[in-house]
Image: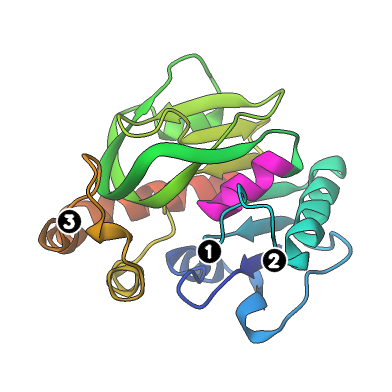
Amino acid sequence: MKILAIQHDAADPPAHAGTVVQELGHDLTVVKLDRGDTIPATADADLLMTFGGAISLSDSDLPDWVAAEQDLIREYARTGRRVLGICLGSQMVAVALGATVQRNRGPEVGWHKVQPIGTADSAIAKIFAEESTVFHWHRDTFGIPDGADHILKSDGCDHQGFTIEDRIVGLQFHLEANEKTVNTFLFVSGLWRQDSPFVQSEIAITEGIQTHLPHQQELLEQVLEQLLA
């Protein structure tokens, strides 16, 4: 299969998601907006993956590529193709499909649990049937698009995941993260220094790599296997 990934900035690459799809034998193309690449005008891949970034969709002044990316997401949805949005990417998917993005009640940073909502019976929801500890790094939160199943929440953020027909998936947390992702975020972002009940210390975040990352990557592999089935 052909996979198109959108990288909004250098700190938020496909990371382990890129590794997994290539190890599964699929053809991966990465559009790097931070290097001047442009958003394609047409949907010509089987799966679109879109990842995190430093902008906030709740701001009024947004780069031109935001509208172009949302148009592309709608084209993937309209033509029955598959979409995986992570963090900013999940917010892009939500807005493209008619929902909104706003500031969460506080930042959520580090290794925190997500809980299943328990009302959805989709294959994606079943992957997250048990409470799991995953990596978070966000200030904003998305609304749930009409027709989507709300599948995950956390103590720090009510909307952590949604899915539509097991082919469009939005996840607020960084399921794609690898060890380099975590260390890069600690280096380039000051969000972990904010005073919030859901912001962990640098030590806790670093220690969580060994404790929680292996299971998180197993979850990612299951999600991608489902989307690429």
Q: Nearer the viewer, residue 48 or 113?
A: 113
Q: Nearer the viewer, residue 222 or 38?
A: 38
Q: Residue 51: percent from the left, percent from the top?
A: 55, 60
Residue range (magenta): 85-95
Q: Nearer the viewer, mark 2 or mark 1?
A: 1
Q: Which residue is mark 2?
A: 4
Single out the residue that lies furthest toward the front. Answer: 60
Res. 229 in view: no
Helix, strand or loop status at disc 2: strand
Q: Is residue 89 magenta?
A: yes
Q: Say which residue appears at 43% left-offset and 20% top-offset.
A: 117
Q: Which residue is mark 3?
A: 208
Helix, strand or loop status at disc 1: loop
Q: Which residue is mark 1?
A: 53
The CA distance from mark 1 to mark 3 is 22 Å
Please say if 17 is above or below 183.
Answer: above
Q: Residue 128: percent from the left, percent from the top?
A: 40, 33
Q: Say which residue appears at 65% left-offset and 26% top-offset.
A: 148
Closer to the chain start, of discs 1 and 3, is 1
In the figure, residue 165 lies in which quadrant?
Answer: top right
